[in-house]
Amino acid sequence: MRPFYIIFVLFAHFIGYSQTYYLTGRPFPLERNNAIKEVAKQWGIDVKYAGNDVVEAVGLDSLNKLIDDQYALIQAKKGSEWLGDFFKQVDEVQVIHEEIRHYVLYSQFLPQGDYPERKLIIARSNKRTYRVVVVEVESTERVTCKSEYLVRWTKRKKLTTREGCSLPFEFPENGIILK
């Protein structure tokens, strides 16, 4: 009976273990990072950007070894072509996000005005419903959540305003951090 428990615990740890894939180099624009976060959530992968602070703290060799180890772990679960499939799905999601952004930006619900820099963060709620959060980026230290919408993305698109406003993801590489 005891070996069964050990095998069960190891199996549960392996299944529940969150894979973290680190992106290095220049960060993508917010729109691409938003699509990456959405697909990563669907795949059960935690994608993080490893900036200079991480490289300096851990070291480039250690970071490369960690990336290779995580790549092999994800490859064992998702298949040998997982990274290509992952970014192919990111491209598809980014196209949908751009259509939603265009729809929301030019709707009558979104108040027009002088925003320092207006960004839309999109999080999928279910199959055809998306949560759209409008943020105002004044500087890297000051990001204000302005409004939140629910978009039903079917042939007959529907946009509804939600009460309150909270960020679904943080994007430290793009200067958007939950506070």
Image (cartoon, grey):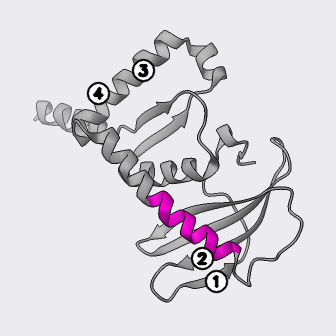
Q: Residues within 10 Å of mark 3 (few under 14, many from 20)?
A: some
| Residue on which the image places disc 1 | 160
Question: In the rendering, at what x and y percent does residue 179 appear?
Answer: 75, 48
Nearest the viewer among 99 and 151 is 99
Answer whether labels 4 and 3 touch (C-beta < 8 Å): no
- Rendered image quadrant of residue 42: bottom left
Q: Which mark is residue 150?
A: 2
**How many angstroms separate mark 3 from mark 2 (CA)?**
38 Å
Q: Which mark is residue 72?
A: 4
Crowd rating for badge 1 (residues with CA inside 10 Å; few <14, some 14–19, many 20+): few
Residue 136 image position (x, y, % from top left): 80, 58
Residue 134 on the magenta span: no
The residues bearing labels 4 and 3 have C-alpha atoms spaced at a distance of: 10 Å
Give the class, few, some or many, for how many residues have Cα within 10 Å of label 2's Cα (few <14, many ≥20).
Answer: many
Kind of residue sitting beneath label 1: Thr
The residues tagged by marks 3 and 1 sit, at their Cα atoms, a distance apart of 43 Å
- Magenta residues, dominant SS class: helix
Kind of residue sitting beneath label 3 = Leu
Span colored in magenta: 93-105
Amino acid type at image mark 2: Leu
Q: Of the two numbered discs 3 and 2 on the same chain, state the one appearing first in sequence.
A: 3
Place residue 104 in its image quadrant: bottom right
Tell me the quadrant of the picture where the N terminus can be found: top left
**Which of the marked residues, 3 or 1, is nearer the chain's N terminus?**
3
Residue 127, numbered label: none
| Residue pointed to by mark 3 | 66
Instruction: Indicate the quadrant where residue 119 lies.
Output: bottom right
Which residue corresponds to the image point at 61% horizontal and 57% vertical from the top-left?
168
Residue reaching furthest to the bottom: 156
Up the image or down, 40 lies above or below 105; here it is above
Label 3's element?
Answer: helix
